[in-house]
């Protein structure tokens, strides 16, 4: 019988876990950080009353995730944006298990390289719990979407929820999976760390 285990799940079990245990100094395998779910969402934006755009958004999320999305609805009315409580304002899909790893593989090796002028992802996209968010201005980056059939272009956001608990560990986890981080940008943890005061040499008075 053909092995149906996703490639990145095998990589996580056989390579990433022992590597992170060594690099992070972890004695317990259960302490190794992991990605436990991926959330893909897109808002309708200015197309709250555009049925065609809403149909495109739902179709996009279904095709790139292989799972039917749910509509996200407004929790309260906002008159300035003409939003009523309960109105559909976007769509979202949550991936776990094998389907999550299959999407992750496609995200790293296909979608990201197809972004125009792509120079790597920024560590600043990691929050203080080690979760990672990346926004796409155009949904055309995903291979399931053919540019010649697109009538309306929209953006979307991909959120990787991890058990890392801090940005440094989160970056180590995602780097092990193959995320191409930009080296010229520090993590928010590095940014928040106070700098050591510089010692100024005393000038002799003549």
Image (spheres, rainbow, N blue to C red):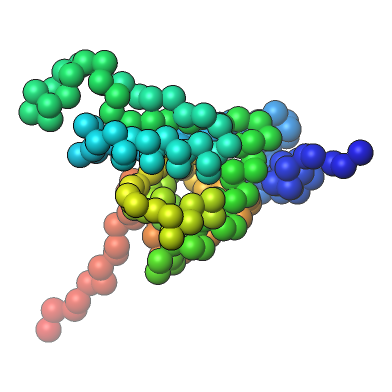
Query: Seen in the image, is 11 located left or right of residue 166?
Result: right
Farthest residue, direction left = 80
Q: In which quarter of the view is residue 169 placed?
A: top right
Camera-side residue of 173 and 166: 173
Residue 137 visible in the shown view: yes
Query: Seen in the image, is 3 located left or right of residue 155?
Result: right
Q: Establish if 116 lies above or below 204.
A: above
Camera-side residue of 187 and 15: 15
| Residue name at image x 26 percent, y 16 percent | 86
- The x and y percentages for residue 127 are 40, 39
| Residue name at image x 59 percent, y 45 percent | 104
Farthest residue, direction right = 1
Quadrant, the N terminus: top right
Q: How many marks?
A: 0
- The x and y percentages for residue 141 are 46, 56
- The x and y percentages for residue 179 are 55, 55
| Residue name at image x 49 percent, y 52 percent | 145
Query: Seen in the image, is 103 located left or right of residue 142?
Result: right
């Amino acid at each position: 019988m053909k092995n149906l285990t996703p490639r990145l799940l095998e990589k996580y079990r056989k390579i990433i876990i022992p590597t992170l245990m060594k690099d992070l100094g972890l004695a317990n395998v259960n302490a190794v950080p992991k990605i436990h779910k991926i959330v893909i969402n897109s808002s309708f934006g200015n197309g709250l009353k555009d049925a065609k755009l809403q149909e495109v958004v739902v179709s996009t999320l279904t095709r790139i995730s292989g799972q039917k999305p749910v509509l996200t609805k407004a929790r309260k009315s906002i008159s300035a944006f003409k939003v009523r409580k309960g109105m559909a304002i976007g769509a979202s899909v949550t991936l776990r298990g094998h389907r999550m790893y299959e999407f992750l593989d496609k995200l790293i090796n296909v979608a990201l390289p197809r972004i125009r002028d792509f120079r790597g992802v920024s560590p600043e996209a990691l929050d203080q719990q080690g979760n990672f968010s990346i926004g796409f201005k155009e949904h055309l980056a995903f291979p399931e979407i053919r540019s010649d059939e697109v009538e309306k272009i929209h953006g979307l956001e991909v959120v990787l929820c991890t058990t890392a608990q801090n940005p440094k560990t989160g970056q180590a986890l995602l780097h092990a999976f193959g995320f191409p981080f930009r080296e010229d940008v520090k993590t928010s943890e590095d940014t928040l760390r106070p700098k050591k005061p510089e010692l100024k040499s005393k000038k002799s008075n003549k």
